[in-house]
Every structure is written in structure tokens, then in C-alpha cells.
Image (cartoon, rainbow, N blue to C red):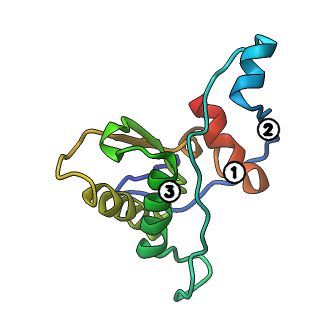
Amino acid sequence: MWKSFDKDANGHVPGECIGVLLLQPLEQALTDGNQIYAMLKGSAVNHGGRALSLTAPRVEAQRDVLLQAYEDADINPETITYLEAHGTGASLGDPIEVEAVTQAFRCYTGSKEFCRIGSVKTNIGHLEAAAGIAGPSKSC
């Protein structure tokens, strides 16, 4: 059993999938009368930088990309109630990811336990090439 963010996490389980998101400017979606499931308010991209290994994430890199995304979206992370994380179930990466989220939130608030965190990988495995589409699909 896969256990993302659990003390008994023991690595990732591979899976296979394909997924597609159709993106459209909000004004056009409204004009076309399309069902709107979610809106992208902002984005950010970075690189993990120099690390001990390719598979070892860096807290600072993850924290910084979160802070960039909050700024780009012009939101206060204290208003976030759920975060769909990477959460591979690895004892190395999951705690680093949680620490990065915690540090990013602390730049805005001292409040605690206001945001749930989860990972679709707990349900369907790590979809390798489709891993990036699984989270947004779950959230919609």
C-alpha cells in the first residue's frame, strides 16, 4: 500500500495513464457557454538546482517556486484549504515537500493546520510521464 506523507512511506508505485486538460481564456469560455471546472490564477517554474542526487528535492527550491506562484496569482496562502502535492510516498521526498510548503506558508502566516495536503498518487500510483496531469485532474 502506498503511503504518501506517512511515517511508513516506502517508495513509489508506478502506474500508467493518459490525461488531457483543455485550457481556454476565461472570457472565451464564458462566451462559448463552456462548463468551467477550475481557473488558473498564476503559475511559476524553477529548477531544483544543485543537489546531492537527481532524486533528492531541495526545500529551498520548492519553497521558492511556491512563493513565486502565490505572488503571480496575487493570493495569500492562508486562503488555501487544500494542496495537491507531488507526494510520491518516499521517505526522502515527502518530508522535504511538506517542509517547503510549511516554510512558504510561514512567509505569510503563523496560522497552523488550515490547509489539507494530499496526493493522487496514493490512489493510482506514480503515473510516470502523466504524473503532472493526474493532480489537476483530481482537483477538478
- The residue that mark 2 highlights is 19
Residue at the limit of the structure toward the top, as seen here: 33
Secondary structure beneath dot 2 equals loop
* Quarter of the image where one finds residue 30: top right
Work out which quarter of the rendered image holds the C terminus and state it: top right
- Graded by Cα atoms within 10 Å as few (under 14), some (14 to 19) or many (20 or more), the crowding at tag 1 reads many
* Image x and y of residue 44, in percent: 58, 59
> What is the CA distance from the residue labelled 1 to the residue labelled 3?
14 Å
- Distance of label 3 from label 2 (alpha carbons): 22 Å
> Is residue 89 shown left or right of residue 115?
right
Give whichever of 98, 126 is nearer the camera. 98
Tell me: 24 left or right of 65: right
Residue 1 versus residue 139: which sits nearer the camera? 139
User: Mark 1, mark 3: which one is toward the viewer?
Assistant: 1
- Front-most of residues 2 and 110: 110
Q: Which residue is mark 3?
A: 89
